Amino acid sequence: MVKALLMIYLVWGMNWVVMKTANTFFPPITFVAYRFLFGAIVLLAVWRWLGLPLPKKKYWPWIFLTGVLQMGLNNIAAQTSMVTLGAGMVSVLNYSMPIFAAVMAHFLLGEKLTWRKGAGIILSLAGMVVLMDIQAGGDVTAILIGLLSAVFWGLASIFVKLKLSDVNAISLTAWQMVCAAVTLFIYTTLVPQGPVIWNQASILCLLYNGVLASALAFFLWSWILQHIEVSKASVAVLAVPVVGVVGGIIFLDEPMTLHILLGMVMIMAGIYTVVTARAKVRTVEKRLSGSHSGE
């Protein structure tokens, strides 16, 4: 679990810079379509090599729905909002997903929204705002689109947990990407999006997004969702923007300021608060049970 989360932090954390760069070469929806085409090809090759069976018929409507929501609409909204907003702003909007996921999980999955869990979510999100040094204002439409990306991602995560927990993670992710890519290419064929600039930089953006940020990271995300609560998983990935900031410091000589350090500490404290909630509850219950049995 820890290794999977660390890999997601690294790959998705650095991907915000790559996605912002990709808008120089691709129309947003076209880039998302190509991104998941590349990812689908990689995962289908792995799926075939492992000899995995097709998911059962009853799962396909949910595979299609979650593929369109999580990989299609979520990423289209994020990519589109970055046309006028900075990568940092969009990452904060996108990673507001835990708020929506935790609330939906409370009603749909029975994952109780405790005070401790709520406090951890608020602390982590506040840390992200501090980390990115977001200022008021900006393109209101783009901001709303960015928030929609979080809603789509959270809703898809709920459906994966509710309906697709028994599907092999590789099969699930591969066919989600196929559904998303096919749907997006149909749309871009019917509604032209504009020209693509093909060069070394644009191809590298696609390779990074297709192989690492899509095939690898989304497979790991599907696997994580099948093993822990949606609300906990969604908060755990809030460390992704931290990696983006650290990457900027290391590779772009960006300064380490007080608000960056404070934001990182707040995010990690929030994550710890949420992901250790159940463990602490179980410890207390065990102690109470032991004391009762000794009476």
Image: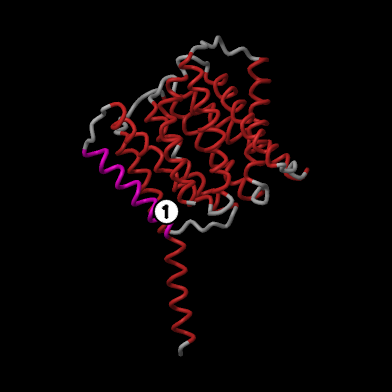
> Percent from the top left, x then y, of residue 109?
59, 54
Establish if 279 lies above or below 211.
Answer: below
> Which residue does the image show at 50% across and 37% down from the upper left?
150
Instruction: Please name the predominant secondary structure of the magenta segment in the image.
Output: helix
> Which residue does the image show at 51% across and 10% down from the upper left?
197
> Which residue does the image show at 43% across and 23% down from the upper left?
20
> Percent from the top left, x then y, of residue 162?
63, 50
Q: In the current view of this chain or complex, which residue is farthest to the bottom? A: 295
- Please tell me which residue lies in front, 124 or 221: 221
Q: In the drawing, does residue 49 fall left or right of residue 146?
A: right
> Which residue does the image show at 29% across and 32% down from the upper left?
250
Q: In the current view of this chain or complex, which residue is farthest to the right? A: 57
Which residue range is magenta in the image? 258-276
Q: In the drawing, does residue 253 fall left or right of residue 20?
A: left
Element type at mark 1: helix
Type of amino acid at the residue the image marks with label 1: Gly
Q: How many marks?
A: 1
Q: Identify the colour scheme used.
A: secondary structure
Q: Please check the rendered image and state whether residue 261 is part of the magenta-colored stretch, yes or no.
A: yes
Establish if 282 lies above or below 250.
Answer: below
Q: Which residue is mark 1?
A: 118
Q: Please check the rendered image and state whether residue 210 is part of the magenta-colored stretch, yes or no.
A: no
Q: Residues within 10 Å of mark 1 (few under 14, many from 20)?
A: many
> Percent from the top left, x then y, of residue 16?
42, 29
Res 177 quadrant in image: top right
Q: In the drawing, does residue 46 fall left or right of residue 232?
A: right
- Please tell me which residue lies in front, 113 or 171: 171
Q: In the current view of this chain or complex, which residue is farthest to the left? A: 258
> Percent from the top left, x then y, of residue 28?
52, 20
